[in-house]
Every structure is written in structure tokens, then in C-alpha cells.
Amino acid sequence: TNEQSSEQAQQQEEELKVGIVLSSGGKGDKSFNDSALRGLSRAEEEGLISNYKYLEPKQVSVVEKNLRFLAENGYDLVIGVGFMQKDALTKVSKEFPDTNFAIVDEVVENDNVASITFKEHHGSFLTGAFAALMTNRDEIEGINEQQVVGFLGGMDMPLIHKFELGYTSGVEYINKTEGTNVKAKVAYAGSSPDAFNDPAKGKEIALAQYNAGADIIYHASGGTGGGLFNAAQKENHFAIGVDSDQDYIAPGFILTTMQKRVDNAVYDVVQSLKNDNFTAGVKEYGLEKEGIKVSLSGLAPMTKAALESGDITEEQADKIREMKEMIPSEIKDKIKKIRDKIIAGEIDVPNYLEQNN
Amino acid sequence: MEILEVLKQIFNLQTFSSTLRMATPLILAALGGIFSERSGVINIALEGMMLAGAFVAVVVSHFTASPWLGVVGAVIFSGLFALIHAVVSIEYHAKQVVSGVALNMLAAGGTVFLLNILFNTSGTSPSVNSLSYWGNFKPTVYLALVAVGITYYILFYTSFGLRVRSVGEHPHAADSLGISVKKIRYICVVTSGMLAGLGGAHMSVGTLDVFREGMTAGRGFIALAAMIFGKWHPVGALGASLLFGFFQALQIRLQGVLPIPGEFIQMIPYIFTVIALAGVIGKATPPQASGKPFKKGER
Amino acid sequence: MFENIEWKKIMKELSIPLLAIVSSFIIGTIVLLATGYPPVETYSALLKGAFGGLNNISDTLLASTPLIFTGLAVAFAFRCGLFNIGAEGQIIVAGLAAAWVGTWTGLPLVIHIPLTLIAAALAGALWIFIPAFLKAKLGVHEVITTIMFNYIAFSFTAYFNLKVLAKPGQIQTPDIKSSAYLWRLSNWIEMHSYLNLGFILALLVAGFIYYLLWKTTIGYEIRAVGSNADAAEYGGIDSTKMILVAMLISGALAGLGGAERTMGLYHNFRNGFSPGYGFTGIAVALLGRNHPVGVVLAAILFGALTNGRNYMNMLAGVPVDLVNILQAIIILFVASDLLFRRMLNYKSEGGQN
Amino acid sequence: MDSILELKNITKKFPGVLANDQVNFDLKKGEIHALVGENGAGKSTLMNVLFGIYQQEEGEVFYKGQELDIDGPEDAIDLGIGMVHQHFMLVPTLTVAENIILGDEITTGLGHLDIKQATKEVAELSDKYGLDVDPQAKIKDIPVGMEQRVEILKALYREAEVLILDEPTAVLTPQEVKELYKIMDFLAEQGKSIIFITHKLQEVLAVSDRVTVLRDGKSIGTVKTEATSEPELAEMMVGREVLLEVDKKPAEPGELAVEVNNLSAQNNRGVKALNDVSFSIKEGEILGVAGVEGNGQTELVEVLTGLREATTGEFELKGNELLNHSARDIKGSKVAHVPEDRHKHGLVLDYTIEDNLILGYHHQQPFAQGINFNFAELEKHAEELISEYDIRPRDKDALARSLSGGNQQKVIVAREFAMDPEFLIASQPTRGVDIGAIEFIHQQIINQRDEGKAVLLVSAELSEIMSLSDRIAVMYEGEIVDILEVEEATEEKLGLLMAGGQI
Ligand SMILES: Nc1ncnc2c1ncn2[C@@H]1O[C@H](COP(=O)(O)OP(=O)(O)OP(=O)(O)O)[C@@H](O)[C@H]1O
Ligand SMILES: Nc1ncnc2c1ncn2[C@@H]1O[C@H](COP(=O)(O)OP(=O)(O)OP(=O)(O)O)[C@@H](O)[C@H]1O
Ligand SMILES: [Mg+2]
Ligand SMILES: [Mg+2]
């Protein structure tokens, strides 16, 4: 029996248990919950962990309970997704000093917590610059003569303004450097949490912006964005996705996605734990090392996954490839340069949240 | 400048089409509400019935690849869903508002639960085939307009309509003439569910191609408001739905133009309804028997 | 003898809600089996989450607290023949008011706590004032107006929270001062639960409502108006006034629920402040047969379900929405009490509900 | 001999009540058959069994010699049975024609309503039977008398051969009642058979061929009208001898108690319903108000009791101005009020007898201290009144809803009289109440007068007015057209005044 228990102990040592508490969108949000889960799946597939458990609190008040449940039940790493979990994770991580925690999109300053944040404003800036450059190329099918782009926000709240400000600053940057006069239309779906779940309204907003001359619309609106993609198809214009790669949702109409690679970040944390070099503190992901990515060629990860699982056909994948190829290479170059400048700190990208603190 | 922009947005074909599109689910659900309430059954479960319809349309479209079958499925299923309301409030004399609240909860919980079971996700369903355009609009938009005409005709020019109105105003009178109050109410409540379900299908496989948790976002309640604002008359409800749709269309277009926060513009339909009820547009009198269970032999 | 009769009556009152609950669990079991979840495990997880240990029991009571308030709000209005569907709006507006007044500085706790409670109650009352006024003066149906005011409240609180009270960049109001805290049990006992004095307050308020309804002339008048407004008018009761009074009290009761959330649980006002406490309150009132004692029991049941469903999710992997379905079914069964009355061969509905 | 309809041994139970107990009833072709009995005797129940609304537990229905099973109103209608209910069954928002064809609509194609044809047919039918109605008028706009004719037309439209009229005269003027008699006679001549339910024995004698009396759910007997009399019928109904005449001493009026001058008020629709009404009542005097319902009596009583605002006028009780004071103030000034509609106004049906016995006085000493009730006092009060006024059941905790009409009325009378009023307003105090209870209530009113109270008695029942009042005011279209001493009042004179004529 001694042998057995030591075997078990060994197994336990080898096989990490990871638990994750999702944000309110839940599994299947085609956004950062899914992205986070994809990171864990990858870790599982690669044998870093034996399995993982995810919990879906429907109310913020349940988050704490969920986190504690995972910590109590011997999970080695407990991940909280979303800024709403800050208070709960702060509390629970103090209660369980021997458990490792990670939080996505917020900072918790505890010795056992890794805080994963993203420079969404940088990605949004790049997206804005890209849209502003593209909207002038009316030789491309789907691009019109007007110099107008759009932004669709979900709920009218500070976090989403961070995306908006990054985006509009990117547009301004192009206007300044290229001498263009691109205007950005901005609209929000509403002021209650419903605003992240109202694709019908999202579609109307998108149609209104397309009708007003926009040909590229970027969104940060959760499920509401589904309506944008629909509108893009109808009007034969373009959309830009957010968070988790959304290119595959409406093949050929979503120019790109401002990807927050939560999957990579989550994977990184798991790996560090596996390699015994888990460190607490802030890990801020930006355009460098592709923590944030705006991919302008080839297939992005979710698209690849969708192709593998048969959710999209090979033809549809070709459409996406064609669309990416049609992006003029000089624009790709410019975007690359801007990206480098942002990374180098040569461009000062305003952060709505910091500005307003 | 601002005024000019506002006027430009008001007198604009795009705004008009947008109004019509956004009014469509409201019109359909409001017509449903009219059937139900004209027969004497309050239906605050329009929201839930729409949601159920939206969900079923996507499920059927997913498994059959036919959005039209989805629409049919939504109509049938929402009718069955409404049957719960009918049984509970007609057969068992439940407080109709309570039954309505329960159905709304059931629809909200049930759709997400089934989303989990069927598609293993809790937020958005997979994309499905959606209805194709007929000209500028989805077919459901025309259906809604036709439904207004049909409802109007049925209510005011057919013997069935006469019975519906009598059952909603004075069920005992109808009963004393051998009209089955229960039967009429069952038919009307189920019809109400079918219309609301069509409204939901319009959203999920008409306007869009997915189901999203809670995607009706309160439209069932706005439809209720439209029904009252339109004084329980199909044409009135059409007008009210268009008005509310217009405000939404305008609100979208005037964001950032007017110095009024969006939150306040969003309140407009609700405030209008309260004003309407306060009698500014003339008294809005519901059918006399609405909300009252019919008990045979009782006066 | 006397006690015997009372017991019989109580058993009769209880039998229908109990049957409704049992029936809905049977349906729940069918759903579980159909969808491939193990019923025994699921229900034992539910039970464990609801009542397993001091922490969970406290959490159940914590979850029931706002439901007691909204349930009382709905039941009280009901007794006056009114349907307050607007408790949802009232509770959030009140929560916001408490979050605002709670941040006032320099007040001693003996003033700050009552002041904040009063502010919330007033806010709740204010939010029902227009529906109440329209009902009392013009006979405008309160169901629709209170629903409309819910939606107005959603936009209104979003505006004041995000654009007026919250610090820029934040999505919640600043925390209230500790002088406005409703003390938590965890101040004295080592525990995780945030159960706070708000629960005791809820019980006291329930007792007060009982007294008001059945031991005072005000209650007599309110119930008379609810039962037969014309007769009340004839009896010199100013039904306009009583409708106003009943609705304002109803709004204030819901408002106190908002105060508990802000002062006891969150310490601020935030997005998603109420996950439908007002709507669940309707069910609680109905299940509690519009009686304060019934309301407290029903609220605890719903609190237990809310709390237990998370364990169901954590331990058995069952989606929490199943419990929402169960709750809806319970309501449907309770509302159809005639079904059980026929089964049990009771005479027609007793009393007014 | 040629019975068209026979009910044999009908038994119908309700929980705890044997509403019909082996009842026999037969109806001959072309006869007018009166059905009488106290409240709760089972008349409506019997008719509802016949009309298919209730199913009997025992007994058979024979129609034209055939045994039938009537499952619902539709069966009864098909057979040619028509019923005019005690409370009219008309949809106010629909037109006369729509109400008449409802359930048996004239349609073309797929249910398309042929309103034109319907209107025509209704007009023809109305002409044929001399029932002057306007097919296109909405029910809510027509007078009660016409509503009644619409109800009759409804039955005739369905080719009814048997017509059940449940208390059809309660809401009619004497003139309209005479009209109705004529219509009934005419219909009987045409071969229709009529069952006529009423509480008024003069009506029975005036119009019926035979009478069946029910008591406690049993049929007591059927007699030929010409061979019976009021006292005999009354005794059959109640089971003992009944005092039909009120035992009344001459009035001894004292000082002026109530003075009303130039009172005007509007009705619910905002139309002037009370126009410059003036009268006065002395202590120990009963002023009767006669008039067809809807001529302002309701509004008058409501103004005097604080339930309606007067636009102009004065109302003094012993020198205190009370006009437009609140209902509570007026009650507090010792004005008692027996309302015309006891279900609507007099009682909270879901309250117990005890709670109903303090309605309107509940906030006063000794019942309440501040806002707190004194429950011992409430109990004492209830027990005293229950025994004094013989309210049944003798259970203060019984719900008012469970009482019979007569006992409900007793609760109201007990409450109002017990508070020792100075001015007593009694409106239709015996409507729909059985003979036994009428006797009791009449005696109580006389007693109040003899104790020196001023009494205002409003009644649509001329016999009641004439037997109780000391003076009689007649109201017509919101005005008091004349005030007569009781000695000079005759039924003819009053009838003429009530119809707007002049003496
Ligand atoms: N729906 C019912 N449920 C229970 N009991 C009833 C019901 N209807 C009538 N009863 C009982 O049946 C008895 C007969 O009632 P019914 O209405 O037939 O009397 P009625 O002779 O028509 O009296 P009225 O002259 O007051 O109209 C009553 O005493 C009552 O207790
Ligand atoms: N649902 C019921 N349950 C029990 N008893 C009832 C019910 N409905 C009626 N009754 C009884 O039936 C009897 C007659 O009732 P009804 O309402 O016809 O009174 P009524 O004297 O005819 O009054 P009115 O003359 O004003 O119509 C009463 O004894 C009443 O208590
Ligand atoms: Mg362009
Ligand atoms: Mg009767």
C-alpha cells in the first residue's frame, strides 16, 4: 500500500488540476471565455494537465463561491476570467496561500496570483489605423468611396470606451500621417448588460453606419456583434472582430480580428506552473510576442479549428484566404511599422481607463 | 447644425426601413397580445414566447437546414408553449400575471439549458441558414404587415372575431349563448403564442442567423406597451410599434449628435406608454374581462 | 380544541405549496433523466449547497434576504388588490440611493445606518409613486406602468451609476463608508458568508407587516380596499389614499431590499445589481400566499434553490439554468392551485387569493 | 295536458347545500308559469339545470314528451329554450344586432359576418313582436327597458318556444312592467311558453296562469293563479303566516332634521344627473323617494353620503353643513346608510361578519385605539348584533360571502341601525330579499322612525314606498317633480309623475 500511495502522490505531482471560473458570457461566447478554454484544451492535449474543470457563475455574487470551491477541492491552479472577479479572487487567494491563482483582465496584487492583462487599446489602435487605411481603397470590392469607418460598442461603459478610444486614435493617427480625412462613427447598443446580448440591435446599428458611408466596422460588443457580421454580409462591406478570432463567423466579410490571445496567456501560466516557475505579478500582453494580434494574412487559430471541425467548409476558408490576400501589401507594411512603433513606445496610445483615473 | 442633422435623419429612407425592421417583432408580438387580451387573458409572457420562438427557429433550421421550417417550428412550438399559459390560467384560474412571469422565467432558463444540451454552449448557438431577402426586407417583415390586416379582419369582420370580443368583454353573456368561453380563449392564447413565436423567429432566423441568450432583450414588454398604446386595436398596435421602432432607429442614428445621453432616449417608449395610459391619448380601456378567470355559473 | 382547528387550517394552507414543490421536483427529475444527469447526485448537491454547513446555511439566508423584502412588497400590494410588478425597478433604484447616501462622510453610525435605510426606502417609494398616483387617481392599471418603470429604472440607474456616481473608468459606485455598513455575521464568527443584519431586519419588517395588516385599522382599510374598493369607499375609507399608501409602502419594502444588498452585501452599486429579485419576489409572494410568514418561508426556499444550484453546477455539472426552470415550474403549479384543490377535493378558493 | 316541458324529481347538490330536492315542475304550451320562492329556495338553480348550466344529480327532463340530457346552454338553445337572466347577459361594447346574433351568426364564405343581413333580420323580428329596438345602437347607450327587450329578442331569434325570465321586472318602471306584461301575453298567444321568476306577488297575480312555489329546494306545490291569493302564496313560500301590511302608527314628526337645498351633481359620465333638488325631513318622519331607477336617486344618495361630489347646493343635518364632506365625516355625523347594492357597497364579502359589522366605524372608539384594534370590543359587538338581528349562521367568523342575500342585508342593517343614527338613508333596502326578511327590515325602519330619526327611503318598489313613507317625493330626470303626502298618493298618480307626466 505504501507503494501505491507513493505512486498516487507521484501521479498527483505529475498531473496538474486546473479549474477556471468563466465570465458571464459563459462557454460558447465565441469570445474570450472560449479562448481561455482553448488554452486549457491545448494544455490538456499536450499532457501538461490531466483535465480541467470550468464553472459558469450566472451572477457576480457566485464567483467567490466558485473560486473557493475549486481551491478547496485541491485544484493546483484556479483561474478567474474577467474584470468582475477582482474582489472575489483577491479574497479567495488570500484564504488559500498554497494554491496558485490567475486572473484575466484585472490585477490582483497577491503573492500567489498571476495577473494577466492585455493592452486592448494598442490592438484597437492598430485596428483603427488598419480600417482607416483600408477605407480609402475603393478599388477593392466592398470598400466604398466615403472615408468613413464605424465602431459598435456593447454596453456604454468605461471598459468598452477603452476599445473605442484606441480605435479612434488609430484613425486619427492615419489622418495625421497620411493626410486623409477618415471619420469614425461610434454607437453603443445600450446601457444595460442586455446590450451585450442584442444582436438584432447590433445589426441595425451596423446597417445605420454602413448606410451612413462606413465600410468597415469594428466592434466590442460581445454577442451583439453577431448582428454586425450579419449586416456586413448583407451590405457587402466589412467587419472587424474582437477578442477571440472571429474571422470564420462570416467568411470573407470579417477583415480581421483584434485578437486577445487569452489562450496563449492561459497556456503560459499552466506551463510555468508545470515547469515550476510560476510567478505572481502582472503579465501584460501586448502586440509584442503576439499576446495581442491583428492578423492580416493566413488563417487565424479559431478559423483553423473551425475548418478542422467542419464548422466551415474548405471553400469558405478559401474565401477568407482570398480576402486576406486582397489587403494591399503596402497597407500590411504600414500596419507592421505602426505595430513596431507602438511596441517601441514611439506612438503614444491613449488608455481611456488610465486617462480617467 | 444639430437640428439639421436630426431632420436629415428623420426624413430618410434608411431610417424608415430601419423603423420597419425594428418594428416587426413588436408588431407580431403585439398582435399576439391583442388576441389574448381581447379574449380576456392577460399575456405578459410575450417576451418568453418570443424567446422560445427565436430559439426553436434556430434549432429547427440547424437540424433541417431550412429556415422556413424553422419559422414553422417556432410558430408551432410557441403555440404549444402558450398552451401552458392557457391551461394554467383558463383551466386552473391562475393569476394570469403570475403565470406570465413564470413562463418568462421558463423560457429564459429553458433556452439556455437546451443550448447547453443541444450545442454544448451557453451563449450563442451555431450559425444556421437564415431566410433570404424578398426585395429589401426579410419575408417576416411582410408577414407582420399582412398579419395586421388579417387580425383586423378576423377581429371585426368574422363571426369568430365577434365571439372573441364578446368573450373578452362579457364571458358570461357569451357562455349563456352556448359559446365555449374556454375554447375561444384557448384558441386566442395559442394564437398569441404563435404570433409572438413568429416575432421571435423573425429575430433569430429572419434578421439574424443565430440564437443568442436573452436576445429578445425586453421586446416582448415593448410589444405589450405597443398593444396598449394602440388601444388593443391591430392598426393602433401597428402604429405604436412603428413609433417605437422609429425612436430606436433614430436613437441609433443620433448617438453623439444630440447632447442627450442614450440612456434617456432608451426610456422613451416606456415613458410614452405611461403617458398614454395616463390618458393623454384618450383613455386606454382594456377589455373588461381581461385578467379575470371565467368561472361558470358565477356572476 | 382550538389549537386543533388552527393546525388543520395551517396544514391546509401548506399542503398546496408543498404539493406544488414536490410536483415540480418530479418534473425536474424527468428533465434530469431525459438529459442524462443523475438525479440523486444532483439533488443531494442541491441540498448540500443549500443547507450543508453554517456557511451554506448563511448563504441561503443571505440569498433569501432580498427576496423577503421584494416578496413582502408584492404581497403587501396584493393585499390591497394591487399588482406590483415593479419591485425589480424599485430595488435597484433604492440600491443606488443607498450607495449614494452611504458614501456621505462624517456621520456617526447611529445616524448613517438609519439615514441610508430611509433613503433607500424613499427611493423605492418614489419609484412607484407615478404608477401609484395614476392608479389611485385615474385607475390606470398598475401592472403595465410598473413594468414600464422597471425599464426606465434600468436605464436610469445605468446612467447615474456609470456617468454620475462611479469614478471614471469604474463600473461601480465608490464603496460606502463603514458607518453605513449593515454588520456581517463574519465580523464575529469566522466564516465566508456575507450574511448580515439585513436578514434580521427582513424578519422584523415581516413581523411589522403582519401587525400592520391584521392588527391595525390601516391594515383593515387596506385589505378592505383590496377586497372591495366600493365597499371600502362606502365605509368611509379613502381608497385613493389607501392605494397610494399601500403602493408606497410596497415600494419602500422593495427599497429596503436594495438597501440590504448595498449596505450588507456589495457595499456599492454595480452592474447586474439585481438578478431579478423583483420578479422572483412575485413568485415568493404567491408561494407564501401573500402572508408575511409564508413570504419568509418561500423566500428561504428560493434562497436555498439559488444557493443550491451553484453546488449542483459545481458537483454534478448540471447547468444552473435547470434551477430556473424548476423555479418557474413551482410558480406555475402554485398558481394553478385549483389543480391540487380539485385533487384534494377542497372547496373553491378560500380567502381572496 | 299538453305539457311542453316536464322536470321530474330534480335533485341538485352543492357542497353542503341541497339546492334542489326532488323538484317537480311542468310547463304547458302557451302558458305563463310563475316560479316563486324565498332567496336561496332554488329557483335559479332549477332554471340553470334546465338551461344546461348545471347538471342535476338525479331526475329527468322531459321536453315535448321526450327524455333529454341537456349538457350545456347550446343544447338548451337548440331545443328552443331561451333564458333571460336575472342580470342581463349583454356585451356593452357590441351593438344590439351583434348581441342578438352572437353565437348564431349570419355568415357568408369563410365566417365573414354579414352584419347587413343581421341588422335586417333583427329589425324584422323586432317589428313582428312589437319590441321596438334599434339594431345598430350599442348596448352601452340604450336604456334598461330596451336591454330587456334585446334579451327577449335574443331568445326569439333562436326560435325559442320556452322562455325563462329570471326576475325580469326588478329594473323596470311600472309603465315598462305593463309593457312587458303585454309582450308576455302576446308571446303566449303566439304559443310560446313562459317561465316567470319574481319576488313580487302582485306581478304573479297580474300576469301568470299558474304558480309553482319552491321552499328550501323542494317544490311546495303548483296552483292556478285565479284560485290563489297573495297571503296564500306568501305562506306557501315562507312556511308560516306573513304580515304583508306594515304595522305602522301615524307619524309624530318633531323638529326639522335634514335640509337639502338646490342640490346638483353629475353622474359617472359627467352628465348632470341631479338638478336643483330640495327637500327637508323632520325627526320621526320617513320621506320616500319614488322614481324609475336612473333618474338621479343613486346620485342623490351618493351625494348625501359623501360618495359623490355635488356641484352646488346645501345639505344640513340639525344645523351642521355636511355637503361634500368626506364619507367618513358624514358617517361620523350620525348619518347611516343602507346602500342599494349590498354586494358592491354594503359588504366586504371576504371579511367575516364581525369585520363587516364595524365597516365604516372601525376607526372609532371603542373599536380602535389609535390604529390598534380592540379585539375584545369587536367580538362583543358582533355577538350582540348577531343575536339581536337574528343573523344566520350565528358565527361571527363566517365570511359574508357565505351568507344568503337576506342575511347579508341583515348584517348591513344591523350595523347601520346599531350606531344610533340621526339620519337614516335606506336605498332599496329589500331588493331581492325574501318576504320574511322584508317584513323584518320594514319593521326596523318603522322602529327607527318611531324613535325620532329622520329617514330617507329610496325604493323602486311603489308598494314599499307607499306603505312605509309619510311623504313621497317623486324623482324624474334628476329633479324632484313633486312631493305628496302619503294619503294623497295613489299608484296611478305616482306612476304618472315617475314617467314625467303631471297631475
Ligand atoms: N354555485 C353555487 N355553489 C354552491 N351553492 C350554490 C350555488 N348556487 C346556488 N347554491 C346554493 O343553492 C341554493 C339555491 O340557490 P338559488 O340561486 O337557486 O336560489 P334562488 O331561489 O334563485 O334565490 P334568489 O331568489 O335569491 O335568486 C342556495 O341556498 C345556495 O346555497
Ligand atoms: N359560490 C358560492 N358558494 C356558496 N354559496 C353560494 C355561492 N354562490 C351563491 N351562493 C349562495 O346562494 C344563495 C343565493 O345566492 P345569490 O347570490 O343568488 O343571492 P341572492 O339572494 O339571489 O342575491 P340577489 O338577489 O342580490 O341576487 C346564497 O345563500 C349564497 O350564499
Ligand atoms: Mg470608404
Ligand atoms: Mg336567483
Image: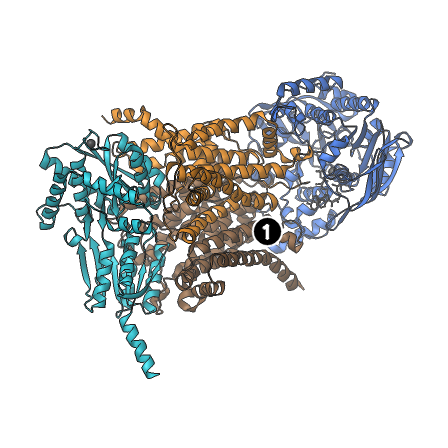
Helix, strand or loop for disc 1:
helix
> Would residue A141 be seen by someone viewing this image from the given angle?
yes
Q: Provide the residue designation for mark 1.
A: C337
Q: Quadrant of the C terminus of chain B?
A: top right
Looking at numbered disc 1 in the image, what kind of residue is underneath it? Asp
Residue D457 lies left or right of residue A339; in this view the side is right
Report the chain shown in blue: D
Where residue A86 appears, x then y in whole percent?
A: 27, 57
Residue B117 lies left or right of residue B40; in this view the side is left
Q: Colour of chain B?
A: orange
Q: Colour of chain C?
A: brown
The one nearer the camera, C282 or B61, is B61
- Quadrant location of ligand 3? top left
Q: Is residue A226 above or below residue A5?
A: above
Where residue D33 appears, x then y in whole percent?
A: 83, 31
Q: Is residue A61 above or below residue A98?
A: above
Residue under mark 1: which chain is it in?
Answer: C
Q: Colour of chain A?
A: cyan
Distance from mark 1 CB to nearest ligand 2 atom below 8 Å: no
The one nearer the camera, D465 or A259, is A259
Residues packed near mark 1 inside 10 Å, few (<14), some (14 to 19) or many (20 plus): many
- Res D141 → quadrant: top right
Where residue B202 appears, x then y in whole percent?
A: 42, 36
The one nearer the camera, B27 or C147, is B27
Q: Quadrant of the N terminus of chain B?
A: top left
Q: Residue at x 33, y 80 (%)?
A: A4
> Would residue A191 be seen by someone viewing this image from the given angle?
no
Q: How many marks?
A: 1
Q: Is residue D472 above or below residue D385?
A: above
Where residue D424 appears, x then y in whole percent?
A: 67, 36
Farthest residue toward the front? A314
What's the coloring here? by chain
